[in-house]
Image (spheres, rainbow, N blue to C red):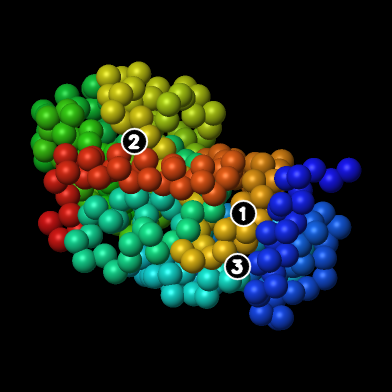
Amino acid sequence: MSTRRQFTQAAAAASVLGALPASLVRAQTSTSSAPLVDTLRMVVGFPPGGTTDAFARRMAEKLRGVYATNVVIDNKAGAGGQIGVMNLRDSPADGTSMLFTPGSMITIYPHTYPKLQYKPSDVLPISTGIVTAFGLGVGPAVPASITNVKELIAWVKANPNMGNYGTPGAGSMPHMVAALLDKAAGTDMKQVAYRGSGPAIIELLGGQLPMFSSPIGDYLQHLQAGKIRLLAVTGKARSKFAPNVPTYAEQGYPELTMEEWFGFFMPAKTPVAMATRMNDALKTLIVAKDVADFAAPLGLVPTASASIDDFAKTVKADSDLWGGYVKRIGFTAES
């Protein structure tokens, strides 16, 4: 017997579908009463091959036949992910375009780029997809006797010329983590910004770079080989991917308890019924075992939002939090 909630959802979906172009209406699936969208374009603001792109492609596979007949990845790389956000902003708000992006583009960039060409309100939060903690890794340039953050800070103060830390990019969340550590420790460490994690890992392994702040997944294969040491992670608890590594909080830096989500967004004016339908699809697909198995080697934890409102609250809270952090650090993209 149908419930009132089911009747309301069906009526809302029918209303929205009646307003959609005929090209969007396709055969119904066995798991949903809503017709499939013809083609969903999933925008990724980074080149093919990276973590964001890899997870987006996995979710594209799973959304085929569930939300859309076809799902295509559209890599719009540039400006540290900003091009992807702007591309989504300018896309039709009809349920046929979606962006998958790290949270930094939405929660940090508005505070660090004085001339940012988009606003967070230009996009509609749909759901988180994955979450990652960050790690502080050191290579052979740092003495093997150093095993924790306290010892590292003492060594940096004694050897200020070695106080250089790499990040995957200026203004990124890993950069903010390291900058907050620098402030809390009273050191004067210098950031070395790289274009992604790959080049930094090479120099960390080679001894040209003493330390590196980056998502934990960047270190995993090197930890197993014993080529890199991980001194701290940013999560609320120790990472299941590196259970022997203490958190920053355990080592006296509770303010460095943070993680970054990668999330799905649609254009701001997308009908709520379409956005909710996508959330319903994602929160079922994201928690599937094959997705967890795919994400684990990358140090990622699949995590879905209960609703679009739930994710919107997360985005707002994180933006407010990072606004305060950015003021404390004193960083802007033009500084």
Q: Give the amino acid type for the residue marked by disc 2 in the picture.
A: Leu
Q: Contact, CB < 8 Å: mark 1 with mark 2?
A: no
**What amino acid is at disc 1?**
Thr
Location of residue 112 by image quarter: bottom left
Instruction: Say if 16 sits above or below 215 in the image.
Output: below
Which residue appears at 35% of the width and 18% of the height? 250
Residue 124, numbered label: none
Q: Which mark is first along the chain, 2 or 3?
A: 3
Crowd around label 2: few <14 · some 14–19 · many ≥20 (10 Å):
many
Q: Residue at x 69, y 46 (%)?
A: 284
Residue at the spot of label 2? 136
Q: Secondary structure at mark 3?
A: loop
Identity, as a three-letter code, of the amino acid under mark 3: Gly
Q: Quadrant of the N terminus?
A: top right
Relative to the observer, which residue lies in front, 311 or 198?
311
Q: Circle 3: is it few (<14), some (14-19), or many (20+) Cα within 10 Å?
A: many
Closest to the camera, between mark 1 and mark 2, is 1
- Position of 236 with respect to 95 (left or right) is left
Please tell me whether mark 1 sits on a helix, a strand or a loop: helix
Q: Which residue is mark 3?
A: 95
Residue 62 x %, y %: 71, 57
The x and y percentages for residue 201 are 37, 49
Q: Are marks 3 and 2 in contact (CB under 8 Å)?
A: no
* Residue 248 location, quadrant: top left
Gap in angstroms between the C-alphas marked 1 and 3:
10 Å
Q: Gap in Å between the C-alphas at discs 3 and 2?
A: 40 Å
Q: Position of residue 152 (x, y in %)?
A: 23, 27
What residue is pinned by disc 1? 276
Determine if residue 134 is in view.
no
